[in-house]
Image: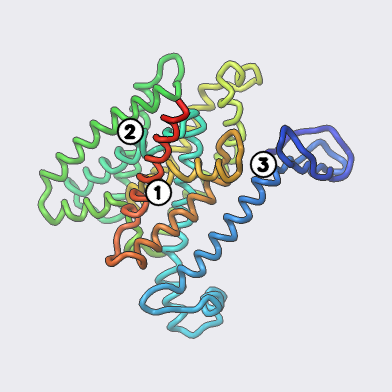
């Protein structure tokens, strides 16, 4: 789906085939603005939205106190009894909303970095931003011992500082995607050893708390966590809307982007800042949840069958993937596990498949 400019005063154009894909052009009768809609991408987005709503309604009814989907809908509109409303709205709804919001943020971040690096491995998990956020949180937990908000602040600062270090180390008359990935992997390895040292020097109770947080979990999060996440994403999403459509020009190469009048390096830096901020928000709220940012953009790309990564499908698939993973972690396993354990298992299988496929193609 893309917004373009075409000088036409005609009515909405019918569906047509554009470079092998069915699209629909919507134009104003008097004006120069037109909207080009890829029908397959639009259909996938609608299907993912419907799936997310359905899974959310089912998730709100699952637990020791079961609630049917009609009762869940009534509770959301304030038409149920007090006990059902408390369970659905006060206890379960914040966790479901956080899963959707954080999954969308991770999907967007992964889509941005995979487009910038032009590599399916170019996600915050691989480049090391999650590891840096974990380092920042560990420093707070071990040396300060603060509450959830201080830990979240440490994770936010750690992710941003790590991203700045990776960018500066990878900068050689610009930043190339492959160089960014290699430098990120090296920085992540070094920070991983720092994290191990911090855990070893901490007392047992602190180390256990840090390990649970490091797995990535939505346990214990309520409305107090939803509000800051929603506010930060409300600030970041307009930035994605402005910068995201220009990703396709960077994918064609810096020379092509400059020929089209774009300043490639400032644009790339702006996208990196937005992508890091999206990852940092998710990590600060729930810990380093791995592999959602890696898998969601590529799976969405295969569903839409587009040559590049679409940010909206990646966000929607990330939201659905994290919500489903959280429900599996809560209800499908013998113990209530952190959601990061499930996403690592799913993402590890996906990564093995991806590496095997790339090796066969080479």
Q: What element carries label 3?
A: loop
Q: Residue 11's quadrant in the figure?
A: top right
Residue at image position (33%, 33%) is: 162
Residue 301 percent across, percent down from the top left: 55, 41
The label on residue 162 is 2
**Marks 1 and 3 close (CB-CB < 8 Å):** no
Q: In this view, does 74 lie to the left or right of 329?
A: right
Q: Farthest residue toward the bottom?
A: 81
**Distance CA(mark 1)–CA(mark 2):** 16 Å
**Total label count?**
3
Position of the N terminus, as image quadrant, is top right
Residue at image position (42%, 72%) is: 62
Answer few, some or many: residues within 10 Å of disc 2's Cα (few below 14, many 20 plus, some between 14 and 19). many
The label on residue 80 is none
For the question of whether residue 25 can be seen, the reply is yes
Give 270 or 150, whichever is nearer the viewer: 270
Q: Farthest residue toward the right?
A: 10
**Distance CA(mark 1)–CA(mark 3):** 26 Å
Q: Residue 224's quadrant in the figure?
A: bottom left
Q: Mark 1 or mark 3: which comes first in sequence?
A: 3
Give the residue at mark 3.
1
Position of the C terminus, as image quadrant, is top left
Residue 64 percent across, percent down from the top left: 36, 77
Q: Mark 3 or mark 2: which comes first in sequence?
A: 3
Give the residue at mark 1.
282
């Amino acid at each position: 789906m893309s917004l373009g400019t075409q000088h036409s005063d005609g009515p909405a154009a019918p569906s047509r085939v554009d470079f092998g894909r069915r699209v629909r052009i919507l134009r104003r009768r008097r004006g120069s603005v037109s909207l080009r809609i890829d029908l397959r991408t639009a259909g996938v987005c609608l299907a993912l939205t419907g799936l997310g709503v359905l899974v959310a309604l089912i998730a709100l009814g699952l637990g020791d106190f079961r609630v049917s989907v009609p009762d869940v809908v009534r509770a959301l509109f304030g038409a149920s009894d007090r006990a059902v409303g408390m369970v659905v709205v006060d206890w379960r709804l914040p966790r479901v909303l956080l899963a959707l919001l954080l999954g969308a943020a991770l999907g967007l971040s992964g889509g941005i970095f995979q487009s910038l690096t032009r590599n399916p491995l170019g996600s915050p998990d691989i480049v090391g931003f999650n590891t840096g956020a974990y380092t920042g949180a560990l420093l707070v937990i071990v040396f300060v011992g603060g509450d959830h908000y201080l830990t979240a602040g440490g994770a936010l600062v750690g992710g941003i500082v790590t991203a700045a270090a990776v960018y500066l180390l990878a900068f050689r008359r610009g930043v190339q995607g492959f160089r960014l990935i290699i430098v990120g992997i090296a920085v992540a390895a070094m920070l991983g050893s720092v994290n191990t040292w911090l855990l070893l020097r901490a007392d047992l109770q602190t180390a256990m708390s840090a390990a649970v947080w490091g797995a990535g979990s939505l346990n214990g999060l309520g409305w107090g966590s939803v509000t800051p996440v929603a506010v930060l994403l409300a600030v970041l999403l307009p930035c994605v809307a402005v910068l995201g459509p220009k990703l396709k020009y960077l994918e064609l190469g810096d020379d092509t982007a400059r020929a089209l009048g774009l300043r490639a390096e400032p644009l790339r830096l702006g996208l990196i800042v937005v992508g890091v901020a999206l990852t940092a928000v998710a990590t600060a709220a729930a810990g380093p949840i791995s592999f959602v940012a890696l898998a969601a953009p590529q799976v969405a790309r295969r569903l839409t069958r587009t040559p590049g990564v679409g940010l909206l499908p990646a966000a929607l698939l990330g939201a659905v993937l994290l919500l489903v993973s959280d429900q599996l972690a809560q209800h499908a396993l013998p113990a209530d596990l952190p959601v990061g354990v499930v996403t690592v298992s799913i993402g590890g299988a996906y990564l093995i498949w991806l590496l095997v496929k790339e090796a066969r193609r080479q």
